[in-house]
Amino acid sequence: MILVYLTLLFAGLLSTLFTYLAVTEKDLLKAAAYSAGQSIAYSILFQVFAATDILLAYIAISVGVYSGLLIFIVSKTERFEV
Amino acid sequence: MSEAGLVWSLLVGLLAVNLLVSVYGIIYGRSLTKKLISLTIFSDTVYVFFIMVGYRLVYPTVPPVYVELTRDQLEYLAKHAVDPVPQALVLTGIVIGMAVNALIGFGIIQAYRLKKTVTARELVGFEEVE
Amino acid sequence: MGRRLLGLVFVYSLALALALVVYATGSLQPPHEIKRLGVFYVEETFFGNMTAMSPEAVTAIVWDYRGLDTVYETAVFFLAVVAGLAVFRVSKTPPLKRGVGLTEISRTSTKIVAALIVVVSASIALHGHLTPGGGFQGGSTLAIAPLLVIPIFSYYALLARRLTPGLLVTLRGLALTAIGLVALLPVFKGLEVVTNIRFYPAYILGQLVSGSLLLYNSSEYIAVASGFAAVFLYLSFEEEFHEEERGEDHE
């Protein structure tokens, strides 16, 4: 039980760290990478909450497809936020 | 009062702060891409809240999937499985959200093609484009 | 940098304050029971009177109990991708070129990983009615493979193997038509739309296929994967090519 609590707290702290970094980052490519880190933290939460179906869809979409989409957007538009 | 309540409170606090930070990013982010990133963080946090509703604190907690097709397994799952309804809803939400976010991304690229900028204030004409 | 660190400390202390307020009210306790509806689905999904003949409750809800919702959801997904393709539409593909490419190491490892992704995604999708997974999950996993191939081998590698956007969009249309047909077929026998077990067989040759769930999952797998692959292929064409294409359209 204590392991579940520790994992939950670790993933929660990690997600807040990455969310803050992603929102305050001026380099949008780095922001996309931080967003992927936040997705990994949420994936740990989903795993602990026994939501395996969500985990399979979420990790593929938010770490893979979504990062790819953002990198394409950044490469076609501007890299730095003014 | 128990340690479970404390952990749940801390987790809800952290997730609520994630919501606030991402709303800040949606409102004050200068680039449309930054707004899109914040939007996805916002929707993901909402999904985590949804899944939290369906969790139950029994040991062990298992996903709502039959490992073997017996009546014993049914009784075991009825006591130990998490709620499948939020999972089904969130699964739908993730896919729809992904499609809509991809559409927003195409909109951003199209805006850059037409105006050569993705800064929101310049796009709506508050600031002059150099 | 110092300002950012200060902001991080502020964010964490705000979280702690919120948590303490919530804890002090004592209103938040993790439940030991789930809602009656959840128990109903868990019990009925394989053994009950309203069975979907699927050991996996989530897939049973997504494609059987709330099947009509998911069919409409697929329609929304379809429209969103179609709108994206409309923005990026090109009448022809870029001419093939040959380049030097990345190093041997990255190319070889990408080949291995891409093959593994295809196998794993097929397993996720086709066992969707037995184990965690399903059409969406498998399809979005398969969409990673072209995403990996495009930066390493460039999109010419896909185009040279006849994996053109046109073919992918056609494949996607066929898969979506298959979903529509599977949903509509029971109507001709006088049953409701999206009927599962009363129309489709639960076992084929002794294998549990859970009626229409296998058909839905495999069609959705192809639809999601080819939709994303087409989007990424269009996105990977250079902006210069898109500009040329638009210039020709105007003339």
Image: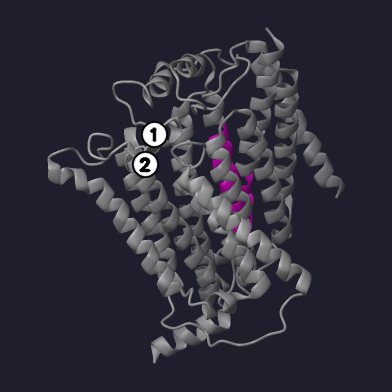
Q: Mark 1 points at which residue?
A: C60
Residue nearest the observer in this picture, B27 or B129: B27
Chain part drawn in magenta: B24-48
Q: Earlier in the sequence, mark 2 or mark 1?
A: 1
- Marks 2 & 1, CB-CB < 8 Å contact: yes
Q: Which residue lies furthest to the front in this view?
A: C205
Residue at (57%, 24%) from the top-left corner? B62
Measuring 64% from the left and 29% from the top, which residue is drawn there?
Answer: A48
Residue type marked 1: Ala
Residue sitting at the far right: C2
Residue C89 percent location from the top left of the image: 43, 75
Crowding around mark 2 (Cα neighbors within 10 Å: few <14, some 14 to 19, many 20+) is many
> In the picture provided, is B73 more to the left or to the right than B119?
left
Principal secondary structure, stretch drawn in magenta: helix
The residues tagged by marks 2 and 1 sit, at their Cα atoms, a distance apart of 8 Å
Q: Mark 2 points at which residue?
A: C213
Question: Which quarter of the figure is the N terminus of chain A placed in?
Answer: top right
Q: Residue furthest top?
A: B1
Indicate the chain on which mark 1 is placed: C
Q: Which amino acid does label 2 sit on?
A: Leu
